[in-house]
């Protein structure tokens, strides 16, 4: 069975550019969450989507946005990239949306902003 | 404000011995806890979970203990193997109304052969 898949795996962008990261959840999972992990820190929550609706947002600026599609895949968009956006972006999927649901991570997308 | 803390950045253990990784939290509303293992250049891999209605959960070599009064959980790995060398993260979530997991900063475990 396929796990959570993310693309691209690595990318380099210039300050001010825009980036789109993609995620396909585990089959049967309806919830997708996005996390940002910078070196030396644990993952930080960005968004959760369930049944195509945003159900939670972390403490990130409006430059960050996301959406979930009818097939439950998801995109994370970041506009006006800053050097500080360089990080590992992790997508996680779960069956449901609430506490008590284990989230399973993909391999991540490594973003470098230069 | 770090609601989930892993105060030991690193830990070294001999192969075959027990590894104990600790995690403390401050939010009494947290009711579900997860442990993940992360190798370099990979995403976190789920290891084991525990609900606040339990104080212990076991899965093979991995056991998680939860002490709600102390707001403390620990992951025991017995026996430790060199392949267990990785960074371990604990994560916590609260009851309905919040949809996020709060992660600790991780503990790097090195199992010495």
Image (cartoon, coloured by chain):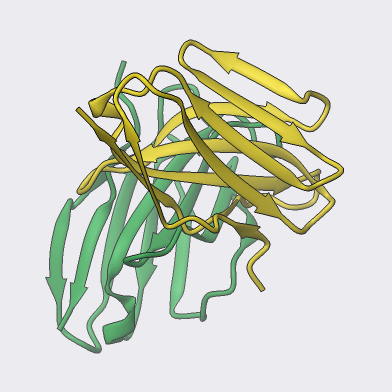
Chain colours: A green, B yellow
Which residue is rendered at x = 26% and y = 41% of the image?
B39
Q: Horizontal and vertical percent for residue A105?
A: 40, 39
Relative to A77, is A31 on the left or the right? right
Q: B34 or B64: which is nearer to us?
A: B64
Q: B37 or A73: which is nearer to us?
A: B37
Q: A28 or A84: which is nearer to us?
A: A84
Residue lying furthest top: B60
Relative to A78, is A50 on the left or the right? right
Using the image, determine if residue B73 lies above or below residue A68.
above
Q: Quadrant location of residue B37?
A: top left
Relative to B75, is A37 on the left or the right? left
Q: Quadrant location of residue B34?
A: top right
Using the image, determine if residue A28 lies above or below residue A58.
above
Q: Horizontal and vertical percent for residue A94?
A: 54, 33
Using the image, determine if residue A12 lies above or below residue A103.
below
Total marks shown come to 0
Which residue is rendered at x = 71% and y = 37% of the image?
B32
Q: Horizontal and vertical percent for residue A74?
A: 41, 48
- Please say whether residue B111 is visible from this viewpoint: yes
Relative to A71, is A21 on the left or the right? left
Using the image, determine if residue A82 lies above or below residue A100.
below
Which residue is rendered at x = 78% and y = 37% of the image?
B67
Q: B83 or A69: which is nearer to us?
A: B83
Pick the quarter of the image with the C terminus of chain A.
Answer: bottom left
- Please say whether residue A81 is visible from this viewpoint: no
Q: Horizontal and vertical percent for residue A45?
A: 53, 59
């Amino acid at each position: 069975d396929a796990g959570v898949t993310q693309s691209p795996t690595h990318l380099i962008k210039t300050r001010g550019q825009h980036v789109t990261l993609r995620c396909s959840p585990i089959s049967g999972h309806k919830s997708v969450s996005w996390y940002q992990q910078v070196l030396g820190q644990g993952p930080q929550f960005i968004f959760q989507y369930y049944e195509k609706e945003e159900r939670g947002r972390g403490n990130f600026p409006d430059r960050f946005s996301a959406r979930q599609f009818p097939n439950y895949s998801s995109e994370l968009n970041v506009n006006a990239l800053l050097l500080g956006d360089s990080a590992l972006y992790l997508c996680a999927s779960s069956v449901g949306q609430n506490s008590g649901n284990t989230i399973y991570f993909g391999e991540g997308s490594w973003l470098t902003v230069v | 404000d770090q609601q989930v803390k892993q105060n030991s950045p690193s830990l070294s253990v001999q192969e075959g011995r027990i590894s104990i990784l600790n995690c403390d939290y401050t939010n009494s509303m947290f009711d579900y806890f997860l442990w993940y293992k992360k190798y370099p250049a990979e995403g976190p891999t789920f290891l084991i979970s525990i609900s606040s209605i339990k104080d212990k959960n076991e899965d093979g070599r991995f056991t998680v203990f939860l002490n709600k009064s102390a707001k403390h959980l620990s992951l025991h790995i017995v026996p430790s193997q060199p392949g267990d060398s990785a960074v371990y993260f604990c994560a916590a979530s609260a009851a309905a109304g919040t949809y996020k997991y709060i992660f600790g900063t991780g503990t790097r475990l090195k199992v010495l052969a």
